[in-house]
Image (cartoon, grey):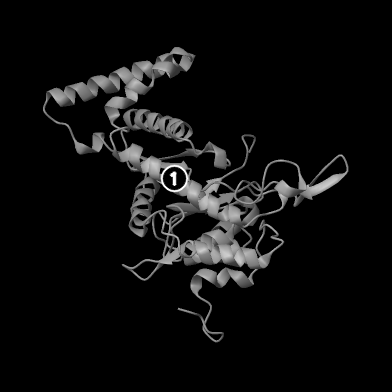
Amino acid sequence: MHAHPHDPVPDRLSWRDLPAAQQPEYPDPEALRAVIADLETFPPLVFAGECDQLRARMAAVAKGEAFLLQGGDCAEAFDAVSADHIRNKLKTLLQMGAVLTYAASVPVVKVGRIAGQYSKPRSKPTETRDGVTLPVYRGDSVNGFDFTPGARVPDPERLKRMYHASASTLNLVRSFTTGGYADLRQVHAWNQDFVRTSPSGERYEQLAREIDNALNFMRACGTDPEEFRTVEFYSSHEALLLDYESALTRVDSRTGKLYDVSAHMVWIGERTRQMDHAHIEFASKIRNPIGIKLGPTATAEEALQYIDRLDPEREPGRLTFIVRMGAGK
């Protein structure tokens, strides 16, 4: 299917005519176009139905009936896509989730900042060391960390590496969370090292023992719910690189609506939330649960405008404000 010049711009590309902050300057636009065309053919990393499910879970959080636990790295690295790295991250979130669920007696919605968080917004486009000025490191999805001209030139091929790194991370997370690894009875077994090496570990151990006793009691009573064996785990990252996000935005066959299938939830950062710019426009077109980071300069007026723009239907679970004020504020 080819677009003709007089066709209207498809919704997922409506951001293209607007200013977009924090986008890399690729030296070769042709190479970028080729990569985008490739990405557009890649399979989804998540499914629209799962995004809807997360939106329903977030709605419960908004009503105070559940608790949101979101955690992970500020920026993932391609070389950290090992089973151990991913398992440890997941383990920490699941442990926290188990304790929170037990302590608060409400379900905990678990969202990882994982499988896509390979980009970072920066305050300056360049970095200077010893009189040498090079493009700033924008995360593994854009360029290399080493301070050399070769490493720092933005390379569109890295967008494909981001996709593959995200895919292998998600694949492992799905295996862990559904394949018995996340069984509640395991949670206690995981803690041996953690408990030995930390003072708060002893308090945790006490709680874990209580959880164990409760599980044993239930099992003795003859109940062994399926829910104990698997866990719902959702992925999220900042929707920073619009070329990548829009290449992974697809029409859901069930509803005809657009979903960004690079993650269940995506957010707009403090540095890219300009009201009339590309990131907000992009977010307004997709059906995923979305977040907006609000820093110390944000006004109530702006917050209300974001709601009108991104959640006109006032749909519970659709829009989350993520406050980043620093402890002092």
| Residue 308 visible somewhere in the drawing | no
Q: Nearer the viewer, residue 139 or 225?
A: 139
User: What residue lies at 39% left-to-right and 40% top-to-bottom?
Assistant: 173
Using the rendered image of the protein, determine whether residue 200 is visible from the camera's viewpoint. Answer: yes
Judged left or right of residue 29, residue 286 is left
Q: Residue furthest bottom?
A: 6
The reply, left or right, for residue 66 in relation to residue 239 is left
Instruction: Pick the residue in front: 286 or 192.
Output: 192
Query: Does 156 appear above or below 197?
Result: below
User: Quick one: quadrant of the N terminus?
Assistant: bottom left
The C terminus, quarter of image = top right
Given the current orientation, which residue lies at the most extreme left position? 222
Considering every residue shown, the one lying at the far right of the view is 131
**Vertical comparison of 221 with 5: above or below:** above
At which x and y percent is residue 23? 66, 58
Question: In the rendered structure, which amino acid carries the disc numbered 1?
Answer: Ser
Which residue is located at x 35 percent, y 56 percent? 52
Which residue is the site of mark 1?
168
Residue 250 drawn at (x, y percent)? 43, 65
Residue 24 as seen in the image, left or right of residue 321: right
Residue 301 falls in which quadrant of the image? bottom right
Image coordinates of residue 84 in percent, x first then y, are 45, 31
| Image quarter of residue 91 | top left
Q: Secondary structure at mark 1?
A: helix
- The vertical placement of 8 against 315, above or below, is below
Q: Residues within 10 Å of mark 1 (few under 14, many from 20)?
A: some
